[in-house]
């Protein structure tokens, strides 16, 4: 039996808000761990702010350069070993694993 919060989490509005939060937390994690943003090179606030701005610009350029050109389909990832197993044995591969009815 689900409680009040569990029922609320099934609403499309909540799922849309959580998807945005998930993207933001992923970006913050990328900056903190991937680009060393937990430590600044300078102690003064204006220079630290400038470091953050330049890092954000570099990340945005990196993300934009990895996007496919318009008109091209994005490259697909190779199937996992489990997906290969399903294909070899004729099982349908669901687009989303939660689509399975319980």
Image (spheres, helix red, strand yellow):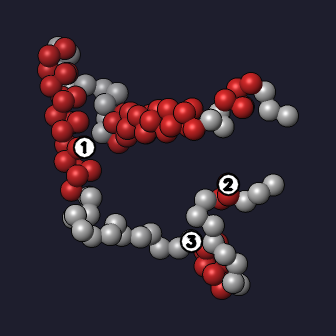
Mark 2, residue position:
98
Residue 92: give its label. Answer: none
Location of residue 19 with respect to 41 vertically, above or below:
below
Q: Residues within 10 Å of mark 3 (few under 14, many from 20)?
A: few
> In terms of depth relative to the viewer, which is nearer, 18 or 54?
18
Location of residue 70 with respect to 17 vertically, above or below:
below
Please identify the quarter of the rendering in which residue 86 is found. bottom right
Location of the C terminus by quadrant is bottom right
Does the CB distance between marks 2 and 3 fall below 8 Å? Answer: no
Image point 56% across, 71% down: which residue? 80
Mark 1, residue position:
59
Left or right of residue 99: residue 45: left
CA gap, disc 1 and disc 2? 32 Å
Location of the N terminus by quadrant is top right
Does the CB distance between marks 1 and 2 fall below 8 Å? Answer: no
Q: Residues within 10 Å of mark 2 (few under 14, many from 20)?
A: few
Mark 3, residue position:
80
Q: Tell me where residue 72 appears, x and y as whole percent.
A: 27, 70
Image point 70% across, 78% down: which residue? 91
């Amino acid at each position: 039996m689900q409680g009040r919060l569990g029922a609320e989490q099934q609403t499309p509005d909540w799922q849309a808000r959580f998807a945005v939060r998930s993207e933001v937390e992923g970006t913050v994690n990328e900056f903190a761990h991937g680009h060393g943003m937990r430590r600044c090179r300078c102690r003064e606030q204006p220079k630290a702010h400038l470091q953050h701005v330049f890092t954000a610009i570099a990340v945005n350029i990196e993300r934009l350069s990895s996007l496919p050109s318009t008109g091209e389909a994005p490259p697909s990832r190779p199937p996992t070993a489990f997906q290969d197993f399903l294909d070899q044995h004729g099982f349908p591969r669901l687009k989303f694993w939660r689509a399975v009815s319980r």
